Amino acid sequence: MSLARLQTQSPMQSRLHRVAWIIVLSLCTASCFSLCLSQRDARAEEPEAAEGASDSEVEEKPWRDSLLFQDLRERYERPEHSIEEKKKGKRRKRRMKKKDKRRLAKVVEMQRRRGWQWWREHKPGLEVDPRGTPELIVCSVNLNNYSTAKQVKKATRGKEGKKSRLRKKERSVVDAIKTSGCEVIALQGVVGAGIEGALEGLERLQEQLSEGSQEKWKYYLGDSNHKKGFNAFLVQGEQIEVVTVRHLENLALAQFEQFTEDEVFRGPIELELKVKSEEHRQARTVYLLNFHFRKNLKTKSLEPEQGRMQMAESLRRHVRSRQTTFTGANPPIYVVLGDREGGKAAPATQILEGRIGLKDFHSKGACRLLDEEAMLAEDEGEEESEEEEEPKKRRRRQPVKELFARCEDGVSGPKLLIGLIGENFIPPVPRKQREVDGEMLTFYSRKAERERREKVRAQRERRSEIYVVPFDLRYVYRSYYHRPMFASGVEEIERGSENSPLVWARINW
């Protein structure tokens, strides 16, 4: 612009021209500065890309991966996002191609690696358990009338003992034991025509476990008042020394009123072990008590609850008396394993755990035994009518009913034994986050919550359990940083007893 033209302009026009020039120069400066910053970031990312170039799963541009991940997840992961297309008059859903599946799997793995890398950078040392590897893995399984085919037929009078069924059960049990890494196994449901017949079944199971491995197994069979059903232990490894074996078939039972059972059905067996530590720590003494609250060999028949309640009371007293004898800074660890033949709400289970006692079921006590019909009638306020007594000749044997405990408020006390299977914490899985009123809230999927409730319900219905006293809970946590969760689990058994799978727990001190 010439000088003469500037002199002819008014002061207002010249001021506007100066402002326009200033704006243009500032925009040019900002664009140049942003270009320099982007080039500097690109140079800084070049070494990292070069280091990760060997890994084919890591992409060069992470923002593209995140966009691809969101797109594929919204399109294919949930059924409501599936696209319907019309072809030749028919509707068909659009399915994910193999290429898209591979891309999605790659992106999911990459996101997992980045999250794990961030965790290690911000929380160093938390992924390593300071306790080291577990010193002992204990298991318990109900073999549901197991022995050789000949002995099973003798014990059940020919009703069971088919070789194909026994072999399927045997293979399933061996696979579950090897998968869980069991070192000591509490066995219930070992049968035979006497002790010699039950030993034949234990020897066969010992051979199957030792086949193809260098570890040797030792078996210990407990005495029993049943004469056909027994409890036993299998112990593996040189790190475990069996100090004493105690047979508790003569355990005294409390008797009064309706509780008339005078002997334990299948005698419990107790082992005292001395376990050496692989981490060069102090060796510890561990007590294991194996029990089974069943009398008949028919696994599907319902038995009276009163006998199981008496045995549960005697076992709890035995555990409490053992605890009073333990002294020292590191007292022995006491573990109770077995099949209680009832769920978590059964009266025998509540007595064994110590929530209520057998004395509460006196005629003037605070608890009563009721079946389902009586409980419903009591809730509705109906009075049961007294039935007329029938003559002795026409009187028939009444079927056994499942009984429940109804107690007054304030009767339940603290637990002496904690179940590692039925009381293990199952955390809900967060699925997505959403902003509500300026606050980020986490919402859970209905499907994930339904699956979680089913797992909790299955835990309460299982009859196989592993118990420890509250003082020993610190030795069975999943890790030093997962206090609510126990290092325990379940392995299903083919042809096994219903709701009695193989259960395991890791002990680490």
Image (spheres, rainbow, N blue to C red):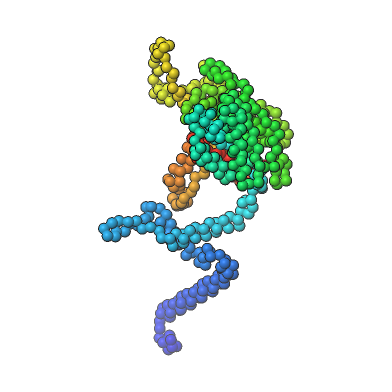
Q: Nearer the viewer, residue 367 or 262?
A: 262
Q: Position of residue 344 (x, y in %)?
A: 51, 32
Check the picture and name the quadrant holding the N terminus. bottom left
Q: Nearer the viewer, residue 388 or 479?
A: 388
Question: Which residue is painted at 49% across and 60% down in the image?
Answer: 106
Question: Which residue is painted at 46% across and 50% down in the image?
Answer: 431
Whether residue 48 is visible to the viewer of this picture, yes or no, is no
Q: Residue furthest left?
A: 89
Position of 379 compared to 127: left or right?
A: left
Whether residue 108 is visible to the viewer of this picture, yes or no, is yes
In terms of image quadrants, where is residue 17? bottom left
Question: Which residue is painted at 41% across and 79% down in the image?
Answer: 13
Q: Position of residue 472 (x, y in %)?
A: 64, 36
Q: Nearer the viewer, residue 31 or 488?
A: 488
Is 62 located above or below residue 187 in the figure?
A: below
Is 102 located above or below residue 44 in the figure?
A: above
Q: Position of residue 406 (x, y in %)?
A: 48, 24
Question: Which residue is painted at 59% across and 24% down in the image?
Answer: 225
Counting every numbered tag in the picture gives 0
Check the picture and name the quadrant holding the C terminus. top right
